[in-house]
């Protein structure tokens, strides 16, 4: 589903559903990018997926895109059907992080400014005319930003002073302003300071504070805010996630949320229609965090559309979710699972670490491994199989 209009109150109609079914062969994209400057090894987001387009950040701070371009989301100055080869976004340099969702893209430059392009139906580009843009535009009046996150049709920015700012669609209170009025102007999320990390789902948001607490706001039909006192209608102001007091990282899928605590345990809440909770069940979900039984050896977590991946300290990785829908793992053998299962078909901990957290190894090794994997998957006839594979493992947080 193309994200242009308000979604229905059904996860099957959630705007990110097509992420796991996108037609972009990202392995092919990364293979093409092997000839480009090295992928950024900064501990920030270097790779992002929209509904059907891909954004990659290089070590030199340039941005490359490919995929669908019917809203100008590739930033090439034109609106056209599709780009099969990665192309550099003109005029955009000194970038330290990228984000994407739906049909829009965002880049955080090293000077603390945010640049956006693509669809603008909800004001997510941060300008008043609500017109799409095929070239990057600066978000007006926003400075001192250190992190960004993209939701279905809204964007979050974390400033150096620990405050969070948001703009775009606010139909479910995802801007955190105590109202439901959408705006193209960055507005401060109410009551939040001391924030160190942010994440955005389709229509809900997460913030991790210095004290280890996690706060959430926006859509809550599936319990993705993690607070049983909040109704299914959601909250237009941040509320504290119940029982999470020592979190070190957070991540968000379409309608589920994930946190890793200081003792390296993983907790999930929200929708469980695709077994995102990881407790062996499939159903509505949980309004409070549920511990995923994988021990305390987790080094990194990342939530994707309807599944979650945990990298363990020994370099192996576990994944769960997407039950009954798409395949993940090596794209050939593993189906979704209601419980964490080990990713199979990999050559060792270095390869897995590369896909979940590329900062842990040299980029040359990562690119070589991706190319090798692509050549070994010639039996895959449908590009969507590649897409589910790469959505699962090639997009680190």
Image: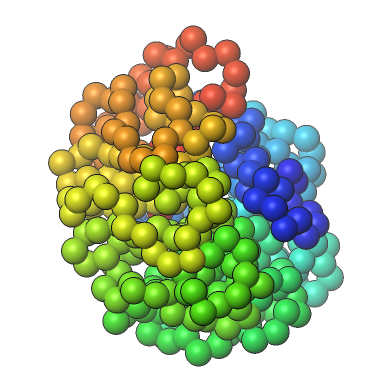
Task: Kindly identify the residue that appears in the image at 32 percent across and 35 percent down.
Answer: 341
Where does the image place residue 178, in percent across and percent down from the top left?
Answer: 65, 86
Where does the image place residue 228, in percent across and percent down from the top left?
Answer: 49, 74
Snapshot colouring: rainbow
- Of residues 120 and 142, which is closer to you in this image? 120
Q: Residue furthest bottom?
A: 191
Q: Using the image, determine if residue 374 lies above or below residue 170.
A: above
- Of residues 38 and 91, which is closer to you in this image? 38
Q: Using the image, determine if residue 97 lies above or below residue 340.
A: below
Quarter of the image for residue 173 reads bottom right
Where does the image place residue 181, in percent across and percent down from the top left?
Answer: 75, 80
Q: Is residue 287 left or right of residue 13?
A: left
Q: Which quadrant, please, contains the N terminus? A: top right
Task: Kindly identify the residue that appears in the image at 39 percent across and 42 percent down.
Answer: 280
Q: Using the image, determine if residue 109 lies above or below residue 182.
A: above
Quarter of the image for residue 36 reads top left
- Of residues 334 and 135, which is closer to you in this image? 334
Task: Kindly identify the residue that appears in the image at 54 percent across and 32 percent down.
Answer: 324
Where does the image place residue 274, in percent across and percent down from the top left?
Answer: 52, 43
Q: Is residue 103 left or right of residue 356?
A: right
Residue 94: in sight, yes or no?
no
Q: Is residue 15 left or right of residue 205?
A: right
Q: How many marks?
A: 0
Task: Kindly identify the residue that appears in the image at 70 percent across and 38 percent down.
Answer: 68
Q: Residue furthest top?
A: 379
Residue 154: in sight, yes or no?
yes
């Amino acid at each position: 589903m193309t994200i242009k209009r308000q979604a229905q109150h059904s996860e099957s109609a959630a705007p990110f559903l097509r992420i796991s079914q996108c037609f972009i062969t990202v392995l092919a994209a990364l293979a093409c990018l092997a000839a480009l400057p090295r992928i950024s090894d900064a501990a920030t987001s270097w790779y992002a997926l929209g509904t059907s387009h891909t954004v990659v950040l290089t070590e030199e701070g340039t941005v490359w895109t490919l995929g669908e371009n019917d809203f100008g989301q590739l930033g090439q100055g034109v609106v056209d059907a599709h780009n099969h080869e990665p192309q550099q976004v003109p005029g955009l340099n000194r970038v330290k992080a990228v984000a994407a969702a739906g049909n829009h893209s965002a880049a955080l430059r090293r000077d603390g400014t945010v640049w956006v392009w693509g669809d603008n139906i909800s004001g997510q580009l941060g300008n008043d005319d609500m017109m799409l843009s095929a070239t990057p535009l600066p978000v007006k009046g926003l400075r001192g930003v250190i992190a960004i996150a993209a939701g279905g049709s809204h964007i979050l920015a974390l400033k150096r002073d620990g405050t969070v700012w948001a703009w775009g669609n606010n139909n479910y209170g995802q801007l955190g302003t105590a109202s439901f009025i959408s705006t193209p102007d960055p507005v401060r999320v109410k009551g939040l300071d001391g924030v160190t990390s942010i994440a955005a789902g389709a229509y809900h948001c997460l913030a991790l504070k210095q004290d280890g607490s996690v706060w959430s706001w926006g859509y809550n039909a599936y319990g993705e805010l993690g607070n049983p006192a909040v109704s299914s209608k959601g909250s237009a102001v941040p509320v504290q996630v119940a029982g999470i007091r020592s979190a070190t990282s957070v991540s968000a899928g379409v309608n589920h949320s994930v946190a890793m605590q200081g003792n390296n345990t993983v907790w999930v809440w929200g929708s469980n229609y695709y077994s995102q909770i990881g407790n062996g069940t499939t159903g509505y979900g949980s309004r409070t965090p549920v511990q995923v039984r994988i021990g305390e050896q987790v080094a990194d977590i990342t939530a994707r559309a309807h599944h979650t991946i945990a990298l363990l300290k020994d370099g192996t990785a576990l994944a769960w979710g997407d039950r009954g829908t798409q395949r993940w793992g090596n794209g050939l053998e593993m189906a979704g699972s209601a419980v964490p299962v080990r990713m199979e078909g990999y050559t060792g901990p270095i390869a897995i670490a590369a896909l979940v957290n590329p900062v842990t190894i040299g980029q040359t090794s990562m690119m070589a491994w991706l190319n090798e994997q692509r050549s070994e998957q010639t039996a895959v006839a449908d590009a969507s199989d590649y897409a589910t594979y790469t959505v699962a493992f090639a997009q680190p947080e």
